[in-house]
Amino acid sequence: MLRGVHVDTILNHNNKTGSAMFAKLHYTAKKNPFSLVSLLALGTIAFGATASQKSLAQPASASTVTIAPDVGGQPVTAYLPDTVSYNPAIPTPESILGANIGEWHVRHDQVVNYMKLLAKKSDRITIEETGRTHENRPLLLLTITAPSNRNNIEAMRQQHIDAMESGKKVGSDAPLIFYMGYSIHGNEPSGTNASLALAYYLAAAEGKEIDALLNNNIVLFDPSFNPDGLSRFAQWANMHKGKQLVSDSRHREHDEGWPSGRTNHYWFDLNRDWLLL
């Protein structure tokens, strides 16, 4: 879907191998909601790897490159568990973006707009701006948990600080803290695009399983580690995306000019260059 190649296109290219892999990913996602982002991102990588192996064995030619009409993503609920209901008062990503997830690469300003709207509509979410990039894009941090935890969040934070300073353990009944961040490389966009689906799930899902998840956990959620790189990549990919989806890696849509969206504004690789500091 992302980088302009839909799952249907990839499955056609890989036949039974791709179909079995997708079925397994879909089953796992339905059983384990917290694996959604990993599966969405890894699914793209896994299918792409299979296609790459095939292309090594058989050089690309006009007969092996897949070209298919762009039918445009799927509604967000197609990616989410059907074991819960969804609050209709919480807007879906497609209702705000004007397109399904995966139809176009999401821009950072669209991510910011949607996350702020979720925080406004849901009593499970608080949002703060932790800084700005060189290109003046906001860095966001969402705190997502049950309303009862949200109302007590400062006391819980202090409890963790006290435990760290004293060397004692936090009480066994304290919620677990999860930190989830996406797309440290801007041209690896599956994470940020998938974050829209997960944020919607955590804000809108209703039922015993989501109540248990949010009562027992606090999710710290950063939808885009690298806003400047993500925006650079989305601009390139969307600008060169056609009405027909082309899987050839040599297509201009998939072959960014320098500097690519991998790095931030300063061409700094946010995880590999970090090791040198």
Image: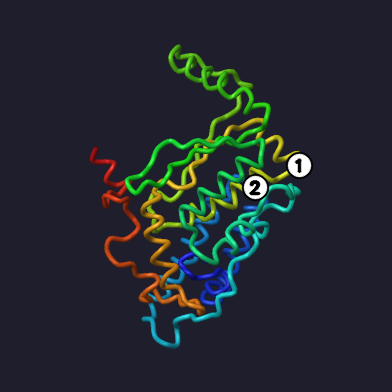
Residue 239: horizontal and vertical position, in percent?
Answer: 42, 70
- Label 1, residues with CA under 10 Å away: few <14, some 14-19, many ≥20: few
Could you say which is closer to the camera, residue 236 or residue 157? 236
Q: Which residue is mark 1?
A: 207
State the mark number for residue 201. Answer: 2
Instruction: Please provide percent x and percent y for residue 274.
Output: 29, 42
> Would residue 149 appear left or right of 181 to someone viewing this image?
right
Compared with 237, 76 (above or below) is above
Marks 2 and 1, how far apart at CA = 12 Å
Q: Is residue 54 above or below residue 121?
A: below
Disc assigned to residue 253: none
- Residue positioned most to the bottom: 63
Which residue is pictured at 45% across the width and 83% down the height? 64
Disc 2: CA contacts within 10 A as few (<14), some (14-19) or many (>=20): many
Relative height, residue 215 to residue 233 (above, below): above
In the image, 115: left or right of 204? left
User: What amino acid type is highlighted by mark number 1?
Assistant: Gly
At horizontal 66% and vertical 60% (from top left) the residue drawn is 78
The quadrant in which residue 235 appears is bottom left
Q: In terms of secondary structure, where does tag 2 sit?
A: helix
Residue 108 location, x and y as percent?
Answer: 46, 53
Q: How is the image coloured?
A: rainbow
Q: Position of residue 49 (x, y in %)?
A: 44, 66
Tell me the amino acid under the disc marked 2: Tyr
Whether 261 is drawn above or below 277: the answer is below
Q: Quadrant of the C terminus?
A: top left
Residue at the front extreme, as displayed: 136
Q: Which mark sits nearer the N-terminus, 2 or 1? A: 2
**Closer to the camera in the image, 28 or 244:** 244
Residue 217: quarter of image:
top right
Give the structural element (helix, strand or loop) at label 1. Answer: loop
